[in-house]
Amino acid sequence: MRVRVGATTDVGVVREQNEDAYLVRAPIYAVADGMGGHQGGEVASRLALETVDRKSREDHEVDLRNAVRDANRVVLDRASGDTNLSGMGTTLTMLRVEGPRVRLAHVGDSRAYLLRDGELRQLTDDHTLVNRMVREGKLTEDEARIHPQRSILTRALGVDGELEVDVFTVDLDPGDRVLLCSDGLTSIVADDEIRGILMSHPDPQAACDELVAAAIRGGGPDNITVVVLDVEEGEDDPPPARGAPAGEESPPQTETSPPPKRGLLRRLVLWVLLPLLLLSAALLLTRAYIDTQWFVGVHEENVALYRGIPVEVLGFELFTLVERTDLPADRAAELQPYQELEGGITADSEGQAREVIEQIEEDLERVTAP
Ligand code: MN
């Protein structure tokens, strides 16, 4: 028997963290829905999945009830050693493919369903207060689904050292489809709609994605996790469609990792650092140019030699005084060639600028000569 698998977990619309997790590592498949403040829920669901994953790799035929009880103890131990994590817990619904059968182990209100010949059957019982009331005839199924206390669990990992685990076997036929999911799906999407989506999406990953999309369309108040297994005639399990390939490290998947920070860095370089660099280069070039320039101007009513250009930009003078002569500026400016003296007579070199000053001196001497 071959298994094709799809898996998706989504934080949903309302929650800030995804406390759900799934495990896809043939022949073990599982979902866990963690709860508890701070990081508690996230830690509990991951710890539970990591533990059952480790147990089943150590012993391929491990008793699933014992594996789940080990996971319970690991969650309890971790919670008692860290006040931030105290009170954390998790559901766990897992299965192991065993030839033409699946062995299931279940605690909490995540669910396993079997789709066979177009009929959807819930394989697990919800360990919730409302489900107990339904069984006792105090509530209908429809009332239970919208009951405000529907998420109160009567059983979970991380609550007590003793844990009752539902364990059972289901025979599978080729063409069967098994769904594992957290209550983020089933409290929003009715069984009939789940059935319709499973029927209309032959690809297991497409079915998972559409189930999550349906829960999000319904408001997505909770984290949503779905794993879909298709049972086919054949020899081996192929690698899972998504998640860790069989036999490799790091199995439990939660929501996708945040986008890499490199994009931010690139944007910073592009929009901040690059313009700064260009501006600096422009200033350096301008500065280099200015330093080659000279002009003759006025300083305290006398003709003076300046380096730079006779310009002020935003209060910054692009020139420095080099030498003040004793030639009177107002008299020089009266002479036709030096009318622009106040604004600066530019020159391409110091020598040229000094020639202008000498010329002014000569011309002034000439006009004052009797
Ligand atoms: Mn949930």
Image (cartoon, grey):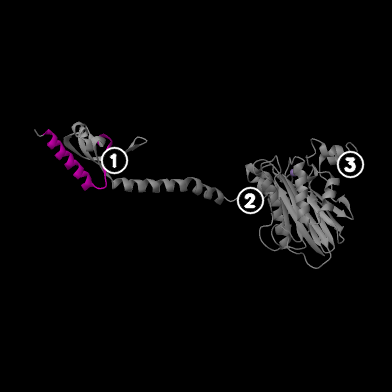
Query: Tags 1 and 2 in contact by the CB under 8 Å rule?
Result: no
Which quadrant would the C terminus be assigned to in this image? top left
Which quadrant would the N terminus be assigned to in this image? bottom right
Q: Depth check: 72 or 344 in front?
A: 344
**Res 37 → quadrant:** top right
Residue 94, visible in the rendered structure: no
Disc 1 to disc 2, how far (Cα)? 56 Å
Q: Disc 2 on helix, strand or loop?
A: loop
Is 142 situated left or right of 319 in this image?
A: right
Q: Depth check: 267 or 211 in front?
A: 267
Residue type, mark 3 in image: Arg
Query: In terms of image quarters, where does ligand 1 lie?
Result: top right
Residue at the limit of the structure toward the bottom, as seen here: 235
Q: Is 240 above or below relative to 332?
A: below
Mark closer to the observer (1, 2): 1
Label 3 CA crowd tier, 10 Å (few <14, some 14–19, many 20+): few
- Residue bearing mark 3: 135
Of the two numbered discs 3 and 1 on the same chain, state the one appearing first in sequence: 3
- Residue bearing mark 2: 257
Is 37 situated left or right of 331 in this image?
A: right
Mark closer to the observer (2, 3): 2
Residue at the limit of the structure toward the left, as seen here: 370
Disc 2 to disc 3, how far (Cα)? 41 Å
Main secondary-structure element of the magenta-colored stretch: helix
Q: Is residue 349 magenta?
A: yes
Q: Disc 3 on helix, strand or loop?
A: helix
Residue type, mark 1 in image: Phe
Name the residue at 83% across, 43% down: 190
- Residue bearing mark 1: 319
Q: Is residue 365 magenta?
A: yes
Task: Please state the extent of the stretch shown in magenta in the rendering.
Answer: 341-368
